[in-house]
Amino acid sequence: MAIAFFMIIFFACGKLDAQVLPRTFGARAFQIDDGTSSGRTLQWDLNSPLTSSYQLHFPNTPPSTAISYLVTDANGNMSWINNPFANISAWELGGNTIGASTKNQLGTLDNKELQFITNGLANVRMSISPTGTVSIGSANQFQVDNNGNITQVNNIPYSWPTTQASSSGMVLTNDATGNLSWIANGSTVTVSTNSQFIGAGSLNVNPVNDLTLNSTATYFRISSSADLNVTGLNSSGVNDGRMVILINVGSFAITLKSLNGSSASGNQFDLPGNTDVILAPKGSATFIFDAADGHWTMISTN
């Protein structure tokens, strides 16, 4: 069987070199020598026994182009065809020349994401979801939605402002849940507008020295059971530019003392004209911590 197959090949090509002769080699193989003393051979073999006999009929002419392929029909009739991939639009390593072709798209046609992998099928390094979200990293550590918004960095979700900053020098602030917004440089804001004072300096003693406030809040409702004095705010750990608003929601006057020695120097109020300010009921005062001056500077009152 093997020898008959070999004879078909060489007679179909129209030539059999007397120097290159076949020989059987094992149960399902044969070899041909190259006709030299090198000992080099070409071998045909079957990987497993045939399930039935069949014939292959080779073409009686050589291929017409340099890159051609042999194909067969269901009856074993073989023929030459030109390169079947020459006119197929495909993405190739090294780049493509697309020209005016409409076949310049890469992606999915169903409701499935497009995945990019490295070092194995299980290692998806980047994907594009059916809705257009681009995710990078094995656990989607970085994400950009279909509107171009960065929605996740290092596996932490963020929501960015929808507009540009209103003035130069503004900075982004985070509300601790990933919602970002623009604020003036040095400002401190909070979503809580009813923060209470905490720590040392009860407003039931007089005077109140170095009143300690919540470190993240901005707006503070304070009250007392009698008229009293406040000599300063605890500035420990406070950043330059920290802003606070004090409002008297009680029924008694609260006097803010200017540069009073009962408070540490960095905790003192630096009031206009070095004059004490009285917060009557519903009165308020706004302060900013000025690190260069080393005090709480009043910027407004009513």
Image (tube, rainbow, N blue to C red):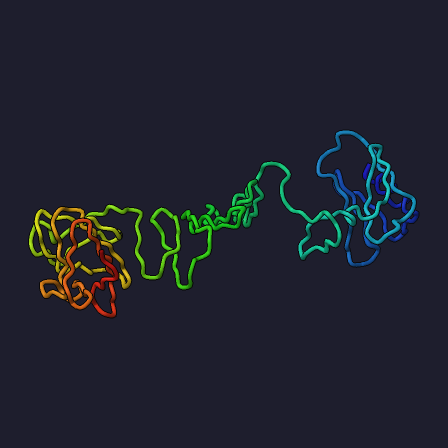
Residue 79 point in image, percent of width and height: 86, 42
For this rendering, which residue is in front, 29 or 103?
Answer: 103
Q: Quadrant of the N terminus?
A: top right
Residue 231 point in image, percent of width and height: 12, 60
Residue 196 point in image, percent of width and height: 20, 47
Residue drawn at 8 percent across, 56 percent down = 207
Q: Is residue 238 above or below residue 138?
A: below
Q: Is residue 162 above or below residue 170?
A: above
Q: Quadrant of the C terminus?
A: bottom left
Residue furthest top in the image: 52
**Left/right of residue 299 with respect to residue 256 in the rendered view:** right
**Left/right of residue 62 with respect to residue 258 in the rendered view:** right
**Left/right of residue 117 with respect to residue 3 in the rendered view:** left
Residue drawn at 44 percent across, 51 percent down = 161
Residue furthest bottom in the image: 292
For this rendering, which residue is in front, 243 or 119?
Answer: 243
Residue drawn at 78 percent across, 29 percent down = 52
For this rendering, which residue is in front, 72 or 231?
Answer: 231
Residue 171 point in image, percent of width and height: 38, 59
Residue drawn at 39 percent across, 48 percent down = 179
